[in-house]
Image: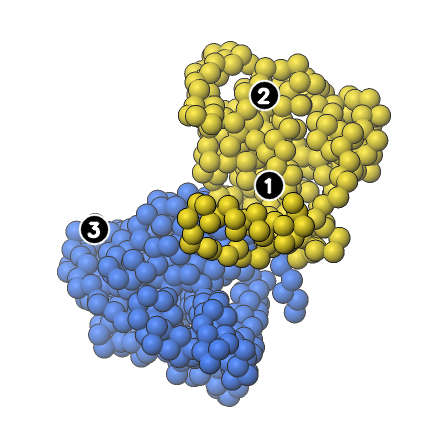
Amino acid sequence: MKIIVCIKQVPDTTEIKIDPVTGTLIREGVPSIMNPDDKGGLELALRLKDEFGAHVTVITMGPPQAEAILREAYAMGADRAILLTDRKFAGADTLATSHALSGALRTLEYDLIIAGRQAIDGDTAQVGPQTAEHLDLPQVSYVEEVHYREGDRFLRVRKQTEEGYQILEVALPCMLTVLASASKARYMRVRGIVEAYGREMEIWTADKIDVDESKLGLKGSPTWVNKAFTRGVKPAGTVHEVTPEEAVDLIVGKLKEKFII
Amino acid sequence: MDFGFNKTEELFKQMICEFATREVKSLAAEIDEEERFPEETVKKMAETGLMGISVPVAYGGAGGSHLMYIMAVEELSRVCGTTGVILSAHTSLCVEPILQFGNEAQKMKYLPKLASGEWLGAFGLTEPNAGTDAAGQQTYAVENGDSWVLNGTKIFITNANYADVFVVMAMTDKSQGTRGISAFIVEAGTPGFSIGKKEKKMGIRGSATAELIFENCRIPKENLLGKPGAGFKIAMITLDGGRIGIAAQALGIAQGAMDETIRYTQERKQFGKPISAFQNTQFQMAGLETKVQAARLLVYSASVRKGLGLPYAKDAAMAKLFASETAMEVTTKAVQFHGGYGYTREYPVERMMRDAKITEIYEGTSEVQKMVIAASLYPKK
C-alpha cells in the first residue's frame, strides 16, 4: 500500500498572540510545529506501515523552513519527503493550496491520501476535502479510526459526527482527513533523528507539478481577508435582584438613558 | 568552543523535551513517594531508542553523539532526577565500558540488547570498605577451569534490582594492589549471584539502589572484560565518563528548580505584588541563572571533548563538581523562595532538593573531584 500524508507547519497557537494594532499574528519567537491533526494522520499511516509494510510519503507546501517538519516525519518513520516550495505558491488560500497539492499528488502513485482534519492556524478544514474533489477521490472527513485487512481494496473507518460516530466503508484509492485524537502520535526515534538530516529532501517547484499556474498562489486565491481584529474585553455587567416587572422598567430605562430606544 | 546545537541535536532536543514533559514529569512525585522504580518509563525509553543513543548502529544503537546522550540525561532530570540516573548508570557505567573495553564477541553479545533497552545495565565497584578508596576491593575472583568464581559484596548499586547485565570489579591478584583488580561482565540470574538489601534513600527514591551478593558465583571465562589486572583502570576511566552523566543529572535538577521558581515567584503575591517584583528575588535569581548556565557550559564542554576523543577527565571532574554544587544551591534556594509551601510535597522543589544532594556524593564525591582537578595542576614528577 502506498500512502501519502499531507502535513503543514504551523505556529504553535498555544503560545501565539495577536498584535492589537495591526490585527495580525505575532509570529516572532513562536515555535513552529507539525500541525497536530496532520501528526495524527502520519501516525495512522505509520501504523499501517508497521502492520502491512505500507510505504509512507509525506508532502508539505510551505516556505523552505517547512523542511523541519519533513525531517521530523523522517525521524518518526516516513520513507519519502517532498517539499513544495515556490514563490508562485505564496499567498495561497485554501483553494489555491488544494490546487497545488493536487497538482503534486497527480504525479505520484498512491492508494491512500491522508490529511489532518484542519490546521490550528487557519481552522478551515477545507484543504483536505478540496484536494479530494480536484482528484475526484472518495473522501471521509473527521476520521477517528482506520481498519484495513490485507488484500482488501477498501477501508473501514470510524467518522466522528456531532451526535456520535458513523462506521463507513470507503473504496481505495481515497482521501481521509483525520483527527489528532485518533491516535497518540509516536515520538521521533533516536536513530531516525540521527539519520533525518542525511536523507534526501525532494524540493518541488510549481513547474514540477501538474496544475494550471493561474490557480496557484495569491492570484488563484478568491479569499480576501478584509480586516482582522481582537475583540475588546467587555466590562463586567451589573446584577440587579428585582422582580420581572421591575426588570422591564430597569432595562427600558437604561436603554433610553443611552438613547438606544 | 561553540555550543550552538546542530540541526540533529535541535531535533533531538525537541523530542526529548516532549518525552520528558509527557511521559516522565507526571510520574516523578508518585515514584518518589512510593519509592518505585519506573519500569513503564524505561520501556517507553527503550521504544524510542533512548537506551542506546550513543551506541554505534553496528551494535544496535542509534549512532548519536555523546552530547545527545548528555542532553537526554539533563532533560529527563529536569523533571525527574530518578529517571535521569537510570539512563546515566545504564549508559555510562555499563554500555560504555563494554563498548570501550569489550572484545568483539562481548560487544556483539551484550550491546544490541542493552542499546535496544531489552536489557538494563549496572555497574559494581563500591563496597562497604571501598568507597572513595576504591582500591580496597575485597570482592575477589579465582580462576577455576573454564570459569571465574566470584565472592564478595557490592553496595549502593544503581539499577541493581532491575538490571540484566553488570560490570563488576573484583580482586584477582591481591599482591598487585590496584593492578590486581579485574573487570567482569556478570548476567543477572547467574547461580551464586543475588541482590541484597534495597536502600531507603533521601532522594532519587525511585531509583533501585541495592547490594550485589556473590557467593561462589561461577561465570564463564570469556566474561573477563579487558585484560586481567586492568579492572581498576577500566573503573576509573568508566567513572570519568560517568561523571559527565551525573553532572548532566545535576544540571537538569538545577534547571528544573529554576523553572519551578520562576513560575512560582510570578504567581505568589506578598505585600500586594508578586515576589518576583522584589529586587532580592531578582538579584538572587540572576545569580542562580548565571551559575546554571556556567554549569551547562562545563557539562557540554566535557561531553564534546569526550565525543571528539580528547582528554576529558579534568573537564568531567570540574563539570560534576560545579554542576552538583550548583544543583544543591539552586534547589535549597528554590525551597526558600517557595517558603512553607516549598517544604511540603505539594510542590516539586523539596523533592528536587533531596535529589540534588546525591549528585555531590556518588560517582566520586566533590572531594574526589577536587583531587582529580588538583592532580592535573600538580602532576606527579
Tell me where residue B66 appears, x and y as whole percent.
52, 59
Residue located at (46% from left, 74% from top): B269
Q: For the residues carrying marks 1 and 2, which lies nearer the camera in this image?
A: 1
**Is the residue marked by circle 1 packed among few (<14), some (14-19), or many (20+) residues within 10 Å?**
some
Q: Answer yes or no: is residue A165 visible.
A: yes
The amino acid type found where label 2 is placed reads Met
Q: Report the residue marked by disc 3.
A: B190
Q: Are the residues flagged by discs 3 and 2 from a single subunit?
A: no
Q: Report the residue marked by disc 2.
A: A175
In the image, residue A171 above or below residue A96:
above
The amino acid type found where label 1 is placed reads Ile
The hue of chain A in the figure is yellow
Color scheme of the displayed model:
by chain
* Distance between the alpha carbons at the discs numbered 3 and 1: 55 Å
Residue located at (65% from left, 45% from top): A261
Residue located at (58% from left, 52% from top): A254
Looking at the image, residue A60 sits to the left or right of residue B44; the answer is right
**Dot 2: what SS?**
strand
In the image, residue B326 above or below residue B121:
below
